[in-house]
Amino acid sequence: MYRVAVAMEETEQENLQQILQKSFSETWKFFTIKKQEELLEIVEEGKADMVFLSLSLEKFSGLKALQSLREKNKNIHVCVFSSFFAADMVTEVVMCGVDAYLTVPIKKVQVNQATAKIITELEEEKMQWINQKGRENYLQQTKNILEYGFLYTILFGQMNEKYLHAYCDALGMMYQGFMISVYPLKGIQDKEEVVEKLQTKIKEIMGRYERSMVSPKMFERFIIYSSWGKGDMSEQQKKEYLSRIGHDLKKGIMDEIGISVRIGIGNVYPIKDIYLSYQEAVNSIYFKNKENVMLFHRDESFLSHREYIDMLNSLLEAVKFGKSEALDMFSQILLCLKELEYNAKINKILQIMVLCCHVAPLKGENELQFLNCKEFLKELEGITEVEVWAYQKFEYLFKLISESHSAGVPVTIHSAMKYIESHYTSEISLEDVAKHVGVSPQHFSKIFKNQTGTNYVDWITHLRIEKAMQYMNVGDRTIKEICFLVGYKDPNYFSRIFKKMVGVTPSEYATGNKILKKNRKSANR
C-alpha cells in the first residue's frame, strides 16, 4: 500500500485518484490536504510516501510551500502540478528536487510515467533498508553468539588461552578483566519481559565503564565479564572503581526496574585466569551477606570440622530440592578447602560429588547413576587449578540433577515449595498450601510425602531450623528475634524443636559460633 498526500483542487484530486487506482494494481491511501500546515505535519511525521502538490492553491504559498516541505523531509517524493511554464519558475521548482513537473489539466500519461518512476524508487529504497537492517541484525546476532560463546567458555569450557584471546580479538576486548554476578533478590522467575529489561539495563550501565558482555539469566543470576583498560592502579583505587560500578548497577536497576539486587565483584585477572574472578564474584556474595554490593577480599580463614559438616549438609539439602543456591554453597566449600594438600582436596571434592548424586531425586536412567570417579581422576591428571575443574564439573552435574528434578517433580509440588519458601515466616498450615496449589489437603499430603520423602510438618520444621542456623551464623540477632523471624511465636517451643533437630539448644549453638569466630580472629593475627 502506498500513502499519498494530495494538495489539489477537488476536481483535479478526483481525477488523479481515478487514474492511480485504474492504472496501478497497488492499494492506495489518500490524504486530502486543504491547508499547508496539514501537509507539512503529515510529511514531517512520515505518514506519506509521495506528495502531489498544485502550486496554484489559494491556501498554499506556491514555491515557499514546496521549500518548507523539503525542509521537513528531504527524501519525500513530490510531483508538482502547474499551469505556468515560466522558465524561472520551472528552474526553482526543479532546484527543490521534485520528481516531476506536470501540467494542468492533468494528463493520464504524465501521471502514470511519474508515478511508475516513484514506485520503482520506493521499492529500491525499501530493499536497501531491508538489506541494511539485515546486515545490522546479522552483525548483532553474530556478536551475541560470540559473546555467549566467550562467557560459556569461561564458565564451562577448558579455559584454552588461545581461544580466549581469539574471542577477545573478535569482540574488541582486553586480555584482562573481571567478573560480576548480579542476583535479583525478588524472584523474577521466567517472565521474559522482566528478564530482558534487566539484562538490557545491566548492559546499558556497564557500557558507561568498560567493554562488557552480559550473559542470559543463568541459575537465577546474570554473569558479566568486563574488560580492564584502566592500566595500573593501586589496590585502593581498584576497590573504589569496582565499588562504584557495583553501586551504579544496584541503583540503576532499582530506579528503572524496581528490583533489588545483590552484586558480587571479583578481582582483575589476566584472561587465562579469569575463571578465578568468577568464583570470587560468587563467593563474595556468600561470605559478606550484610551488604548488597560486595568486593572479594582474599582473607580465607580456618574452617572447623563442625562448620564443614554444616556446610555440607546445607549443600546436600539444596541439591535434594534442586535449589540454585547449591552452586554458591559448593563454591564456598571449594574456597574453604583451598589450603588442603592436593590429594586430600581431591578426595573431599569427589566425596561431595558422590554424595550430591546420591541425594539427588533422579528419575529413570541417567548418566549420574553411572558416576565414575576413576574417570574424574584421569581428567585431573596434569590440572593445577583443581577448584576451576571442580566447579565446572559440579555445574554440569547440577544441571543434570536440576533437569531430572524438574522432570520428576510435579508442578504442584514445585508451586507448593515456592509458596512455603515465601511464607514460612508466618503461620502456614498444610491446608493453606493445599488451597494455594488447588488440591485437597489429603491429596497434597500424599504427593508431598511421595516426592520429598518426608511429611509436610517435618519439612517446614527443617526449613525453619535451617534458616535459624543461618541467622545464628551471622550473629547479629538475638535468639528471640530469630525465633519470630523463622515463624515461631513461642521461644521455648522453638528451643525444644531446635535442640531436637540440631542436638544443642539455640543458645549453645550461638555461643559455639561466637567462640569459633573469636578463635578465628586470634589465629589470623
Image (tube, rainbow, N blue to C red):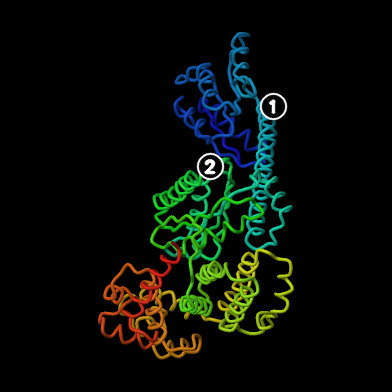
Question: Residue 483 sits in which quadrant?
Answer: bottom left
Residue 162, position as x, y percentages in the image = 74, 52
Which disc, if any, is residue 109? 1
Q: How many marks?
A: 2
Regarding residue 234, the answer to whether it shows in the image is yes
**16 versus 287 height, above or below:** above
Q: Residues within 10 Å of mark 2 (few under 14, many from 20)?
A: few
Q: What residue sits right under mark 2 in the picture?
A: 233
Give the camera-side residue of 117 and 131: 131
Residue 464, position as x, y percentages in the image = 37, 79
Q: Kindly report the distance in space between the C-alpha atoms of the residues bearing marks 2 and 1.
A: 75 Å
Helix, strand or loop at disc 1? helix
Give the camera-side residue of 269 and 463: 269
Left or right: 169 in relation to 308:
right
The residue drawn where x is 62% and y is 19% is: 103
**258 versus 443 height, above or below:** above
| Mark 1 residue type | Val
Give the camera-side residue of 378 and 206: 378
Question: Residue 404 sits in which quadrant?
Answer: bottom right
Residue 74, position as x, y percentages in the image = 58, 26
Of mark 2 and mark 1, the one earlier in the sequence is 1
